[in-house]
């Protein structure tokens, strides 16, 4: 339900939820079917066999979100241990394993429309953060999240694709620049909007483009319309979600649960300010102040996004931008900065890294339980 904006003293908290995708591996580090892990609360299959998604319900506080996410991931890990399986918090499987789709009409259509580049999508595991819409503020929330898109660099978790170093944010490069290269409006970040009507018009245009591409690929229009609606036929990183009454940010990589919770907390904290201060768009720098929110012009924002994908937090200008936009950059330690080290990975080394980072995920959950017990 969309909340109504009010004064700072009487406003209810903005609810938030997350969806995190993990690669499932067996005891040797090879990709595996999750099996009955999907029967646990919050756990669902994704569209490819070796991926598991874990969702939370909408939570009013970060403490609630942390408790629910850690409990659900912990329950999955407990059963996974019994099955000699593990969960890998890396945004790509890092090696060139064969990845099989689950039977789905939606996937079949996408595969035909996107063509060979759809193989890139099969190798992307991410985090989705949902922020509850406030009545009268949804467009400002959408524009705010658009301006925060470079914050994806805070949790870049894999620089590798099929055994080769690609970029600090390999998943974002695959998804935005390579998978939907022939349908650029589908997967890339969209400019700011003036109102919800403009957003709806964009959705309809993109839906029409998708249906046209499907027709060219030989797919019956009735099949497309039965599987997709305008909202579900686009994969842009920031979306107004009418179905959930949220603004959804789909850019971050999958990561350790503690990193996901920290990022969600910071994102909600910044987006929440739009219920009190209307963002303005001006210049190239962008900044938050006690009485102002200034978003950079979209062309400048795209440069920050490109830097976030290519170089991540190694770039000082990006770190400065994120600092101006309200993030404590020093509190983040993206996995992509440490993983591997070489330009290429052998299949055996990739399997070892999966096992290593699956162990780090277990440690992350175990440490959280230890702190809670103390």
Image (tube, helix red, strand yellow):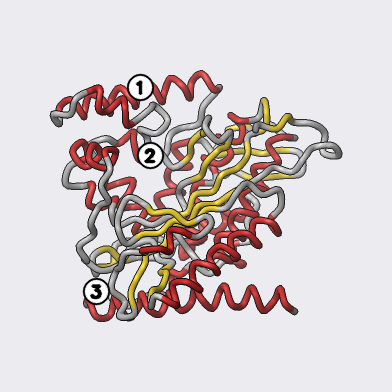
Q: Residues within 10 Å of mark 2 (few under 14, many from 20)?
A: some
Q: In the image, 234: left or right of 298? A: left
The residues bearing labels 3 and 1 have C-alpha atoms spaced at a distance of 41 Å
Which residue does the numbered mark 3 point to in the structure image?
A: 344
Give whichever of 308, 111 is nearer the camera.
Answer: 111
Query: Does residue 213 show up?
Result: yes
Query: 245 or 189: which is nearer to us?
Result: 245
Viewer-nearest residue: 54 or 264: 54
- Res 282 seen here: no
SS for tag 1?
A: helix
The residue tagged 2 is: 235
Residue occupying the point 34% across, 55% down = 124
Q: Position of residue 370 (x, y in %)?
A: 67, 79
Label 3: how many residues lie within 10 Å, few (<14), some (14-19) or many (20+)? some
Q: Earlier in the sequence, mark 2 or mark 1?
A: 1
Q: Are marks 3 and 2 in contact (CB under 8 Å)?
A: no
> Is tag 3's residue or tag 1's residue first in the polypeptide sequence?
1
Q: Which residue is mark 1?
A: 205
The quarter holding residue 336 reads bottom left
């Amino acid at each position: 339900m969309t909340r109504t904006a009010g004064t700072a003293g009487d406003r209810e908290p903005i609810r938030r939820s997350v969806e995190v995708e993990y690669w499932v591996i067996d005891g040797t580090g090879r990709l595996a079917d999750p099996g009955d892990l999907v029967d646990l609360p919050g756990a669902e299959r994704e569209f490819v066999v070796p991926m598991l998604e874990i969702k939370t319900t909408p939570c009013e506080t970060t403490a609630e979100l942390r408790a629910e996410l850690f409990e659900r991931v912990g329950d999955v890990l407990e059963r996974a241990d019994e099955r000699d399986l593990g969960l890998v918090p890396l945004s790509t499987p890092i090696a060139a394993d064969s990845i099989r789709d689950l039977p789905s009409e939606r996937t079949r259509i996408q595969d035909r429309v996107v063509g060979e580049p759809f193989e890139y999508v099969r190798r992307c595991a991410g985090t989705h953060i949902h922020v509850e819409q406030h009545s009268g503020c949804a467009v400002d929330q959408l524009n705010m999240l658009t301006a925060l898109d470079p914050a994806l660099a805070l949790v870049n978790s894999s620089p590798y694709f099929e055994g080769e170093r690609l970029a600090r944010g390999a998943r974002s490069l695959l998804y935005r620049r390579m998978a939907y290269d022939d349908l650029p409006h589908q997967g890339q970040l969209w400019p700011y909007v003036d109102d919800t009507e403009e957003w709806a018009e964009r959705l309809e245009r993109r839906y029409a483009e998708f249906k046209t591409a499907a027709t060219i690929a030989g797919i019956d229009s009735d099949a497309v319309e039965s599987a997709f609606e305008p909202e579900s036929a686009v994969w842009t990183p920031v979306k107004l979600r009418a179905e959930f009454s949220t603004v959804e940010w789909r850019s971050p990589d999958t990561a350790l649960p503690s990193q996901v919770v920290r990022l969600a907390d910071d994102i909600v904290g910044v987006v929440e300010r739009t219920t009190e201060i209307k963002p303005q768009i001006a210049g190239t720098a962008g900044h938050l102040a006690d009485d102002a929110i200034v978003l950079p012009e979209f062309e400048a924002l795209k440069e920050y996004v490109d830097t976030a994908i290519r170089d991540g937090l190694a770039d000082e200008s990006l770190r400065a931008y994120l600092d101006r936009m309200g993030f404590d950059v020093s509190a983040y330690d993206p996995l992509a900065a440490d993983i591997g080290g070489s330009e290429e990975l052998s299949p055996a080394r990739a399997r070892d890294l999966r096992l290593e980072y699956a162990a780090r995920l277990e440690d992350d959950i175990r440490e959280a339980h230890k702190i809670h017990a103390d």
